[in-house]
Amino acid sequence: MSTSILSSSLIAITATGAGARAVWVIALALVALAFIDRMKPATPRRTAVVRVDNKPTPLYAEPERDQKWKTLASLSGGAIVLGALLACILGFLFTIAFEFVGGLLRA
């Protein structure tokens, strides 16, 4: 008998019924969250000890010319490799798509 009640209740769900259930679930979740928040044990607040260091910090230093060129070469090489890989993947996907559409048009 429980399976027939379960199947009929699943079939009888409408959009408004599902919306009302969702609102109830959200409301009950918020009530449970407020209840759990009140149940936390009261712990005394301890003051945090923060260590302060008064050493001067170095400001931004311009990178050297060699480092700039190495970085530019690395980024350019990576962009070329990534672009070639992306072009191969897209070409392969387009080939599959055109073969599939061509097969549909032939049939």
Image (cartoon, rainbow, N blue to C red):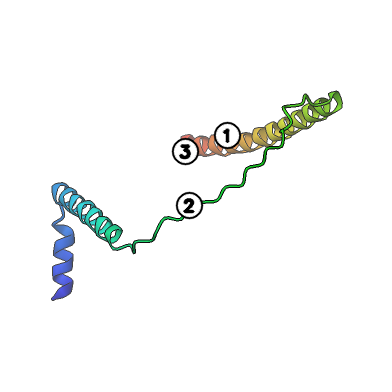
Q: Which residue is mark 1?
A: 94
SS of the residue under disc 3: helix
Amino acid identity at mark 2: Thr
Q: Which residue is mark 2?
A: 47
Q: Residue furthest bottom?
A: 1
Q: Nearer the viewer, residue 2 or 73?
A: 73
Q: CA distance from mark 1 to mark 2?
A: 63 Å
Is tag 1's residue or tag 2's residue first in the polypeptide sequence? 2
Q: Tell me residue 17's x, y (percent).
A: 14, 51
Tell me the crowding category of disc 2: few under 14, some 14 to 19, or many 20 or more residues within 10 angstroms, Cα based: few
Q: Tell me residue 14's x, y (percent).
A: 15, 50
The residue at 18%/72% (across/down) is: 3
Residue 35, placed above or below residue 85? below
The residue at 15%/62% (across/down) is: 9
Q: Nearer the viewer, residue 31 or 50?
A: 50
Q: Nearer the viewer, residue 105 or 81?
A: 81
Occupied quadrant, residue 95: top right
Q: Tell me residue 42's x, y (percent).
A: 34, 61
Amino acid identity at mark 1: Phe
Q: Which residue is mark 3?
A: 104
The residue at 47%/38% (across/down) is: 104
Is tag 3's residue or tag 1's residue first in the polypeptide sequence? 1
SS of the residue under disc 2: loop
The answer to whether marks 1 and 2 mark residues whose Cβ atoms lie closer than 8 Å is no
Occupied quadrant, residue 92: top right
The answer to whether marks 3 and 1 mark residues whose Cβ atoms lie closer than 8 Å is no
Occupied quadrant, residue 39: bottom left
Amino acid identity at mark 3: Leu
Residue 104, placed above or below residue 37? above
- Indicate left or right for 78 with 46 as reference: right
Q: CA distance from mark 3 to mark 1?
A: 15 Å
